[in-house]
Image (cartoon, rainbow, N blue to C red):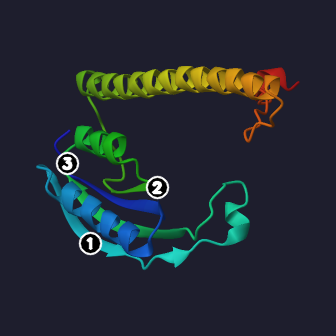
Amino acid sequence: MNEKIKVLVIYEILGRPKEHIETTLEQLLDRIGENLGLKIITRKVHPAHLVDEEKMKNVSVDQEVFSTFAEVEIELDNLQLLFSLVLNTLPSNIEIIEPSELSIKNFDLSGVVSDLALKLHRYDEVTKSLLMEKSKLVNVIGEMNKIINDFGGKSPVEIVEETPVKKDSEKK
């Protein structure tokens, strides 16, 4: 496939302070633009705004949280670069503008799918590691709570058992 690919990509960022997330998003776009085989045609970073408290009700945050996003039109030399862009920058939305049809060789698709599998394996590794660390911390806190209770004190930390999430196949 030798045609250039034109995409419209949206990046979102959430955090604080307001100026930091705006600067961080600008820096991300600058780094993306430095890649060979990729050209940023247009970019528009929208001003950060305060996130509504209602939207943050399930997140324990003591301070104000801001959100901003950028719309970026990018021209890429090939499909591999598009997949690389997606896997490495995790945009929230991608629209392929041109061409209207794509053709790819098996060899090229195999490389892209292998990169995807590698990235997913890394995420799985990190997730499992974090779950093991969490389990260790919960056990240590449980032991400390027992010692505090044995001395007649009241622990400042309460461990709440998580309810396992049922898979779609188990919900029937």
Between 164 and 134, the one lying in front of the other is 134
Image location of residue 169, percent across then percent down: 78, 22
Tell me the crowding category of disc 2: few under 14, some 14 to 19, or many 20 or more residues within 10 angstroms, Cα based: few
Asked if residue 167 shows in the view, the reply is no
**Circle 3: element type:** loop
**Distance in Å between CA atoms under marks 2 and 3:** 22 Å
Q: Quadrant of the C terminus?
A: top right
**Circle 1: element type:** strand
**Distance in Å between CA atoms under marks 3 and 1:** 20 Å
- The answer to whether residue 123 is left or right of residue 159 is left
- The answer to whether residue 64 is left or right of residue 32 is right
Q: In the figure, 50 relative to 14: above or below?
A: below
Q: Earlier in the sequence, mark 2 or mark 1?
A: 1
Q: Which residue is mark 3?
A: 3
Mark carried by residue 42? 1
**Circle 2: element type:** strand
Residue at 13% across, 49% down: 37
Residue type, mark 2 in image: Asn
Q: Earlier in the sequence, mark 2 or mark 3?
A: 3
Residue at 46% across, 55% down: 93
**Are discs 2 and 3 less than 8 Å apart at CB?**
no
Q: In the figure, 51 relative to 156: above or below?
A: below
